[in-house]
Amino acid sequence: MIPQWLTHNRLYELARSGRRLTPWWGVIGIGVLIAFGSQIFALPISLVLFFLGMVEENTVNQPPLVSGLILSLILAVSFGAMILLTWLWIRFFEKRSFVTLGFEPGRVFFLYGRGLLIGLASFTAIVGLLAPLGYIAVENSDPAQVGLAALGGVLLVFFPGWLIQGAAEEVLTRGWMLPTLAARYRPWLGILISSLFFAIMHGLNPNLSILAMINLALYGLFAALYALREESLWGICAFHSIWNWVQGNFFGLAVSGQNASGGMIFNLMETGPDWLTGGAFGPEGGLATTIVLLLSMAIIWWWPASRQQVVTQLVTTHKS
């Protein structure tokens, strides 16, 4: 049985509040331009850092505060531009406000705080699956890059770096693409295209595997269900940001094929088979992540609706 929150959702209503809805070919085309065009905005920062001699091929040689500052700046500018460009499109073409992307006021701190806790628990569960099997080990590293010595850089990377990066990808895919397509066509089309688009966005990441691509699409599906279940983007933005931070700067593992700068609280490494641990791509490329994502989606699917959601669904059904 398909739940009503999947077919009648507040995010769809918000998408319809504008003057027009972008057609599917426009959603994909503009989505590509925003996703890849926004990265150009970080180029001036990279050039300035290069001429100042602050860019090194191996960031392990840099103090955590320095490498953390560089990564945070690049993430904040490039992905901040992604948010800006998405907002400009809906403001001047679809004629609606930024709030309609899923950022309505009310329960903001609760939804965001819960998203942080769930994201932390979800990725920790992946490590918890691998550790008892002996597939997680502590890696030898420079003491200056790990633990309390790296705390400043670790925190700096999260705010504003990962915080903006996670929110930006959610704004583009789950805040704009998903409800726009769902409202104009069918909910399943919005969920499918936004999930596949999210996976393709990471198609150029190093050490990518087939299972990694599947997991990226599964994450997109999970994030879609999460956003629709809460009828808001606050929670999934928090989840996405803390997921990346915990993965790279808390546990010291690769984030979608790339090592995070800024130091780490623990420096762990995968020691088991790549199909389970993800290998060089990081845990997101392994079966352990597949299991956690599938279980998480099952929990979201059968989680009882709140009183507010029941009332909203009844009103929406009556209007339709």
Image: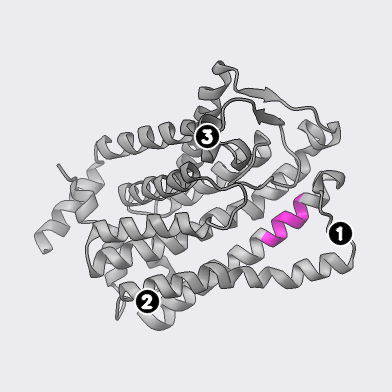
Q: Nearer the viewer, mark 2 or mark 3?
A: 2
Q: Foreground residue, 231 or 207? A: 207
**Element carrying mark 3:** helix
Left or right: 301 as drawn, with respect to 72? left
> The residue tagged with tag 1: helix, strand or loop?
loop
Is residue 105 something one can see in this rendering? Answer: no
How far is the residue under mark 1 from the one under mark 2? 40 Å
Q: Measured along the vertical axis of the image, is residue 138 above or below residue 21?
A: above
Tell me, for residue 130, which label it has, or none: none
What residue would you read off at disc 2? Answer: 26
Say which residue appears at 76% left-offset and 45% top-offset. Answer: 153
On the image, which quarter does residue 222 sit in? Answer: top left
Residue at image position (23%, 51%) is 6
The percent position of residue 146, horizontal first and vertical second, equals 78, 33
- The numbered dot on residue 123 is 3
Please tell me which residue is depicted at 59% across the width and 54% down the height of the picture: 205
Q: Which numbered disc, 2 or 3, marks the residue that appears first in the sequence? A: 2
Q: Is residue 87 left or right of residue 143?
A: left
Contact flag, marks 3 and 1 (Cβ < 8 Å):
no
- What is the magenta range? 68-74
Q: Residue at x 71, y 60 (%)?
A: 73
